[in-house]
Amino acid sequence: MTGRLPEFRVLPAGERGLVVELGNLISPEVNARVQRLARRINQKSIAGVIEVVPTYRSLLVYFDPFNISRSDLVEAIQQMLASDEGLEVVEKEGVRVVHVPVCYGGEFGPDLEYVAQHNRLSIEEVITIHSSRPYLVYMLGFTPGFPYLGGMSDKIATPRLEKPRAKIPQGSVGIAGAQTGLYPIESPGGWRLIGRTPLRPFLPGTANPFLFDAGDYLRFIPISPEEYHHIRRDVEAGFFSPDIRTVSLEDISDD
């Protein structure tokens, strides 16, 4: 599908930042535009640009005003969006799908039974629904590497806890309203915990500390407690390689 990009807005974000808004809706199509612009800015290696941070529907660009003026940066971004490359709304190119093993329920998912009861489903149905589709990583935030995922079925939507937990274990997978996500590090939180992955999504001190990034897809794979502990031992020993595949966007949409 191709077509000219819609109107966009550029807003100031302090002395060293600007926000490029590329749409008014939270949707895969708008987020694809955000990810495409982020990649193009990074590929151009514009002098003075320090960092780009994708969000649901906009891109935050940090820059050094001593190396590039705000007006010159805005002009460069406008040229990128007006170029022939910028005419495609959705790219038919490869995207990464990170397969995340999850042990559902029990000590790893203390709220799974509540989620099932709330939605009048069996525990097995909740697990099947939750693990039946890939989820787009719209953005990272809240804590380092926390993925805001899109695409969860309304059939398992569940309100947050009335009183957040003070400590949630690293790797916990949860549901909050119509969203799902996982906790890359131990932290407070109010999401309903339905499982836990033995993977370590955030590894500080490494060249690439994040297991996934905005624009990737996550797919949750149910595993047993025995498999959880086995994978966890391999992860801690540095022997485990996550299952990461590159597929076409068409394959994602047909999944």
Image: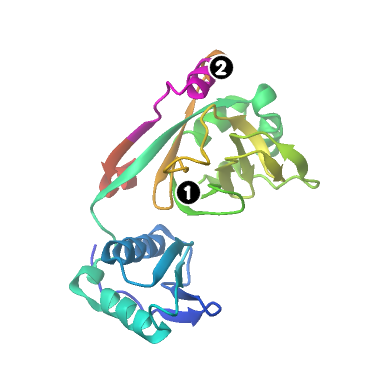
* Residue 56 in the figure: left or right of residue 180: left
Q: Please tell me the numbered disc located at residue 45.
A: none
Q: Nearer the viewer, residue 67 or 20?
A: 67
- Disc 2 crowd rating (10 Å Cα; few below 14, some 14-19, many 20+) is some
Q: Nearer the viewer, residue 56 or 162?
A: 56
Image quadrant in which you'd find residue 65? bottom left
* View extreme (top): residue: 226
Which numbered disc, 2 or 1, marks the residue closer to the eye?
A: 2
Report x, y in % for residue 3.
25, 71
Q: Please give the residue where the numbered disc 2 appears in the rendered image.
A: 229
Identify the residue shown where x is 29% and y is 49%: 249
Dot 2 or dot 1: first in sequence order is 1
- Helix, strand or loop at disc 1? loop
Report x, y in % for residue 60.
47, 69
Q: Please give the residue where the numbered disc 1 appears in the rendered image.
A: 151
Quadrant containing the N terminus is bottom left
Q: Would you say residue 200 sits in the magenta stretch?
A: no
- Helix, strand or loop at disc 2? helix
